Image (spheres, rainbow, N blue to C red):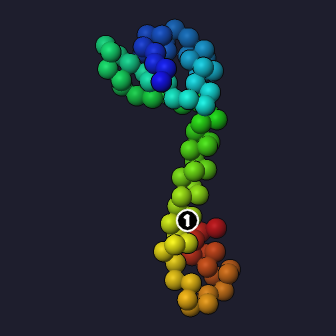
Amino acid sequence: MTSVSISELKKNPASVLSAAGSYPIAIKSREKTKGYLIGSDLFEKMIVYIEDAEDIKAVEKADLSKGTDFEEFARELGI
């Protein structure tokens, strides 16, 4: 994983952001990781993954034996 110091981030944030792309960048201060910076591509992929995982969990948890109407089922899932 790539890392940069807080000082480097302050000097040229645009460069650090463009380097992030699809990989996280550790932000360090005195050799300790203080946080992570991720580019928009990775952030959007993470959001899609999380939403998909939540949808799968909701479907697995749903009681489909009732024969619920699809529209009602979709409302329960919030979709």
- The image quadrant of residue 36 is top left
Is 33 left or right of 41, judged from the image as shown?
Answer: left
Q: Quadrant of residue 55?
A: bottom right
Q: Residue at the spot x=55%, y=89% of the render?
A: 65
What residue sits 61% from the left and 79% below the top? 73
- The residue depicted at 43 percent of the width and 21 percent of the height is 27
- Callout 1: SS: helix
The amino acid type of the residue labelled 1 equals Ile
Q: Is residue 46 above or below residue 33?
A: below
Left-right relation of 9 to 14: left
Q: Identify which residue, 74 or 45, lies in the foreground.
A: 45
Q: Position of residue 1 (x, y in %)?
A: 48, 24
Q: Position of residue 59 (x, y in %)?
A: 55, 72
For the image, the number of numbered tags is: 1
Q: Which residue is mark 1?
A: 56
Q: Nearer the viewer, residue 64 or 72?
A: 64
Residue at the spot x=54%, y=52% of the render? Answer: 50
Q: Position of residue 9 (x, y in %)?
A: 49, 15
Residue 34 drawn at (x, y percent): 36, 25
